[in-house]
Amino acid sequence: MVKPSAYPLRLGVNIDHVATIRNARGGLLPDPVRAARLAIEAGADGITAHLREDRRHIRDLDMELLEAELTRPLNFEMAATPEMIAIADRIRPHAVCLVPERREERTTEGGLDVVGQRDRLAPMIEELNGHARVSLFIEPDPRAVAMARELGAPVVELHTGAWCEAVAAEERDKAKAEFARIVAAAKEAERLGVECHAGHGLDYATARAIAAIPNIVELNIGHFLIGEAIFVGLKEAIRAMRAAMDEGRAGARA
């Protein structure tokens, strides 16, 4: 791997599944905003929340409270729909990440088809660029990175799910190939002047490995951290994740 000077690596914590637990029973607890505050106290550089069309976890009021109360940037994950564009225009978070969304999926299954949906996405990105940093959640493909730049998005987030699944299944050849795709896409992003983030399915070990890719500047991690918090607490889970990322980043600088 070519190793230029590694950029500082930020951690964005996704608090969606605090809301999933709350909604399973109803009521107000556990509170996603409290979780976001704790995450920031533990070292998170920003908070991510995905307002889905079906409101299965995060709700509209959650987004409003997060934007009003947080002391770190809020990254609003959302589908590229007129409804969500209108909400983002009203709430005006620091960042907006456009993701693909299907009601029947359990979690985001892949990257946004920026090439096939170019004409539909272009006016939405132009509108959002007026008040937020726009990120596109894409497959780790240099062609998708190039299209994101053409569309005027200053940031891409590479979908790491296929690689994480291959690692978990011990499919070594597939994992190696998927990791190479991530490396290539990150390099292309840097070459084109597009800020590169990554996320989906990351745990301590995979976050440590991804952190060694010097062109990536932010990891967004949620499900694993909320699950780990059941056993060790949210602050400790985030501190351990930060340590794993720092260890991986140190390897990028070596």
Image (cartoon, rainbow, N blue to C red):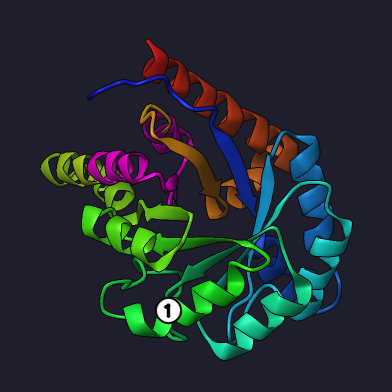
Residue at the top extreme of this rendering: 254
Q: Name which residue type carries label 1.
A: Leu
Q: Residue at x 43, y 31 (%)?
A: 211
Up the image or down, 179 lies above or below 64; here it is above
The residue furthest left is 173
Whole-percent x, y for residue 179 in the image? 24, 41
Residue range highlighted in magenta: 182-210
**Which is the main secondary structure of the residues drawn in magenta?**
helix
Q: Is residue 181 visible?
A: yes
Question: Is 93 rendered above or below residue 118?
Answer: above
Q: Is residue 204 magenta?
A: yes
Crowdedness near tag 1: few (<14), some (14–19) or many (≥20) residues, C-alpha within 10 Å: some
Residue receiving disc 1: 121
Give the camera-side residue of 187 and 79: 187
Describe residue 31's horizontal placement relative to residue 135 as left or right: right
Q: Is residue 251 above or below residue 220?
A: above
Find residue 106 and report its horizontal and vertical position in percent. Answer: 45, 74
